[in-house]
Image: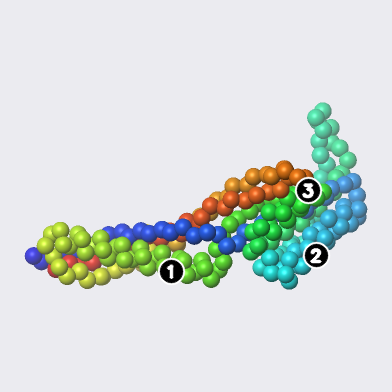
């Protein structure tokens, strides 16, 4: 039998427990005068920054940042369609990466009860080193799946020698000089939060699901 070209896809995924939680929160203030609003946002943000700086030194937070104060003003309208007096607003966005998940639960519970503070988002992820190693391992396994699949196809038609010709991320194989952007190994995670009210103020308890890391490749082989 002459040479046969075999084109296959290989996929693989794994699940890994998250190692870090990235919290996004905002601090907001408003009032009729700009000066007092600026003072208020500074007073609300300062203890939050001090707390995160101390946690970073202690090792429970790997990194944190806060943006400059954003200031704006407008004249709101009441229910009767009348424009009211000018209102000044101020906000600061804060991001913190927690490695101590137990401490995160109590911290978010306490912070969420502060005036002007709002929890905007919580993202679970692997550490950068773990993410790189896991993505590489998953991609390698996806290639192995493609090789095994091509070998099985060849054996089914009585061929024994399989030689790789091309291998690429999903969507790139045979697309010409300007291929579309291929999807990279994906990481997805979700988390459930519950509130424990026993013995005092409610506390957030997190149950993060495993992070799903997946990869897919396309490969082309010659079989003889």
Instruction: Please name the residue shown 78% across and 48% down the image.
Output: 113
Report, in whole angstroms, how far the alpha carbon at label 2 lies from the one at label 1: 38 Å
Relative to 224, does residue 101 appear above or below in the rendering?
A: above
Specify whether residue 220 is in view. Answer: no
On the image, the x and y values in percent for residue 149 come to 25, 60
Dot 1, crowdedness within 10 Å: few (<14), some or many (≥20)? some
Does residue 167 appear to the left or right of 80 in the view shown? left
Give the residue pinned by disc 1: 136
The residue under label 3 is: 113
In the image, 194 versus 198, the foreground residue is 198
Would you call the spot at circle 3 few (<14 residues within 10 Å), some (14-19), or many (20 or more)?
Answer: few
Is residue 11 at least partly visible in the picture?
A: yes
User: Does residue 115 sit above or below 63 in this rendering?
Assistant: above
Secondary element at image label 2: helix
Please tell me which of labels 1 and 3 falls first in the chain: 3
Q: Residues within 10 Å of mark 2 (few under 14, many from 20)?
A: few
Q: Marks 3 and 2, how far apart in space?
A: 17 Å
Q: Residue at x 76, y 53 (%)?
A: 111
Residue at the spot x=57%, y=53% of the render? 208
Q: Earlier in the sequence, mark 3 or mark 2?
A: 2
Q: Is 101 displayed left or right of 209 in the figure?
A: right
Residue picked out by circle 2 = 50
Question: What residue is at 80 percent from the left and 65 percent from the top?
Answer: 50
Q: Tell me: residue 206, above or below residue 143.
A: above
Upstream in sequence: badge 2 or badge 1: 2
Helix or strand or loop: what does disc 1 sit on?
helix
Q: Is residue 220 left or right of residue 128?
A: left
- Mark nearest the camera among 1 and 3 is 3
The foreground one among 106 and 211 is: 106
Disc 3 element? loop
* Mark pair 1, 3: CA separation: 42 Å
């Amino acid at each position: 039998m002459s040479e046969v070209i075999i084109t296959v896809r290989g996929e693989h995924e794994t699940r890994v427990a998250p190692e870090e939680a990235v919290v996004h929160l905002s601090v907001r203030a408003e009032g009729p005068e700009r000066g007092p609003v600026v003072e208020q946002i500074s007073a609300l943000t300062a203890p939050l920054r001090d707390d995160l700086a101390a946690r970073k030194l202690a090792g429970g937070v790997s990194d944190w940042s806060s943006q400059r104060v954003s200031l704006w003003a407008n004249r709101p309208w009441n229910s009767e369609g009348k424009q009211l007096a000018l209102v000044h607003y101020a906000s600061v966005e804060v991001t913190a990466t927690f490695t101590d998940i137990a401490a995160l639960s109590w911290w978010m519970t306490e912070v969420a009860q502060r005036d002007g503070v709002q929890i905007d988002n919580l993202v679970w992820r692997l550490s950068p080193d773990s993410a790189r190693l896991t993505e590489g391992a998953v991609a390698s396994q996806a290639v192995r799946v493609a090789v095994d699949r091509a070998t099985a196809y060849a054996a089914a038609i009585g061929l024994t020698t399989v030689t790789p010709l091309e291998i690429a991320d999903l969507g790139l194989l045979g697309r010409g000089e300007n291929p579309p952007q291929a999807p990279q190994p994906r990481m997805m995670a979700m988390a459930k939060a519950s509130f424990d009210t026993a013995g005092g103020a409610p506390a957030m308890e997190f149950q993060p699901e495993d992070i799903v890391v997946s990869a897919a490749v396309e490969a082309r082989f010659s079989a003889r």
